[in-house]
Image (cartoon, grey):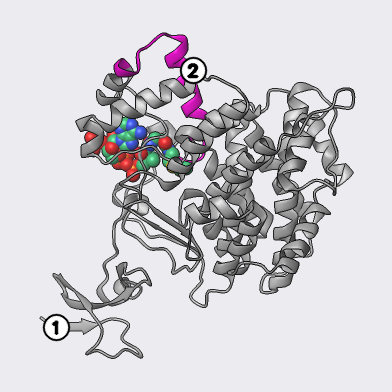
Amino acid sequence: METRILNIEGMNLEEKAFAKLILPNGEFLLPTITGTEGENAIDIRDLRKNSGYVTYDPGFGNTASCQSSITYISEDGILRYRGIAIEELAGKATFLEVAYLLLYGKLPSDTELKNFESSILRRMALHEDLKRQFDVYPRDAHPMAILASVVSSLAAFYTDEKIGDPESVYKNATRLIAKFPTIAAYSYKKSIGHPYIYPRQDLNYCENFLHMMFNHPSCSYEIIPEVVEALDLLFILHADHEQNCSTSTARLVRSSQSNIFACITSAICALWGPRHGGANEAVINMLNSIKNEGISPSDFVERVKKKQTRLMGFGHRVYKNYDPRAKIIKDACHRLLKRLNRQDQLLDIALELEEIALNDEYFIERKLYPNVDFYSGIMYQAIGIPTKAFTVMFAIGRLPGWLSQIIEFDSDPDNKIGRPRQIYQGPNKTNYIPILSR
Ligand code: ACO
């Protein structure tokens, strides 16, 4: 059998590890790549060209779509943004500081952060014409539908982006971070028939969001610092999570060189589903139905084990241990409820479900632990966010991650249009039959 080496240009063959692939048409040596945290990968870029074979990996569980220096996560429960542990950022940084870190790859100086914050705050208002777009939605429209369509409309208002010109991309990234909370708040105001509240430059990012959501011309809303802090923390914890479904979607859409608003719209749509960002809404619906139907948590877990339903907020494609974000959110949830002097029966049910599941063989065997969504909904609910808007909250938090990944994609010399292959399993060539002969 002939052995062919793929993609060896510039390699020191003695130092490199190779994967050996034995196929009916020959043996192939595939180069390997090792990440900075020691993850090993096989570089299959030239596999099809040289061997005629493609790889089959539904759900991409074994496929690295890029090399990235933004976020590191590991099976055993590590999450770092640009090398900094989430536990450290969650206690010390603000959301906009984290957004800067993700976007620019370094922590900002005091002046850089102030400039960044002010560039966001002064862009929070929506164009008046765009504001009128909210009038056309039905009152019970899902806020994710509104977010997706208003964000796609931004492309009609801001047409100055040039792919290959990072400055114009950063400018639109700032616009998006600025306008997301306003769009989210306006969709809520629309749903309850209240007037839209303009952002204020004397409030910070999270204060502005609460102000636009809950203030009203005839009765003012008190902004509680601990609520602001809780919201900021939730946004930090959601800010990036490497190549998840919505981020991969954003990168894929960018690969066709679509504008950044189109990329973010597609990411919002990918986030919406209950297997991804929609899980926070699904968790609260699950907890409510357990409460309202008087099901005991142990009976519910039995139904899960019989595969009649899933325990929403549990399980993760990468983490096979406690999601580090869930740990932080669980503590923050207790703190927030205490500060607001609230007892929440849903929290009690969630705690009981967790306790039962973590001690049950079904969950132990499958390494299913609470994920970021298990407790976040209880916090959003305590803050006053309607259940339907939970995934919008996730989107506000995740936006800096999506943007950073798009910016990284733009500067990647290996970037090309995303175009997976398939293995065709349909009929072989057959003839068209005229309609009257079928
Ligand atoms: N409840 C019950 N069983 C589960 C759960 C769950 N939440 N999650 C996985 N399992 C089981 C599956 O039934 C499967 O069992 P089997 O081997 O007997 O068939 C096994 O665990 C593996 O599950 P997969 O679905 O193959 O795992 P995958 O990595 O594809 O899915 C996912 C990950 C989608 C997150 C899944 O765990 C899930 O559906 N969880 C509930 C929804 C959720 O919380 N999503 C939020 C994820 S985090 C995020 O996006 C923010």
Amino acid type at circle 1 is Glu
Q: Nearer the viewer, residue 311 or 79?
A: 79
Residue, x 58% and y 45% (percent of image)? Answer: 233
Q: How far apart in space, not on screen, are marks 1 and 2 (Cα)?
A: 67 Å
Instruction: List the residue tagged with mark 1.
Output: 2
Q: Nearer the viewer, residue 363 or 1?
A: 363
Left or right, 39 with reference to 163: left
- State which region is magenta: 276-299
Residue, x 66% and y 33% (percent of image)? Answer: 143
Q: Nearer the viewer, residue 430 or 291?
A: 291
Secondary structure state at the residue bearing disc 1: loop
> Which x, y percent locates residue 376?
52, 35
Left or right, 293 with reference to 196: left
Quadrant containing ligand 1: top left
Dot 1 alpha-carbon crowd within 10 angstroms: few under 14, some 14 to 19, many 20 or more? few
Q: Upstream in the sequence, badge 1 or badge 2?
A: 1
Ligand 1 within 8 Å, label 2 CB: no
> Which x, y percent locates residue 293?
43, 9
Say above or below: 199 vs 249: above
Q: Quadrant of the N terminus?
A: bottom left
Say above or below: 117 vs 135: below
> Which x, y percent locates residue 184?
71, 38
> Which x, y percent locates residue 29?
21, 79
Label of residue 345 in the image: 2
Amino acid type at circle 2 is Gln
What main secondary structure does the magenta stretch of the protein show? Answer: helix
Label of residue 333 in the image: none
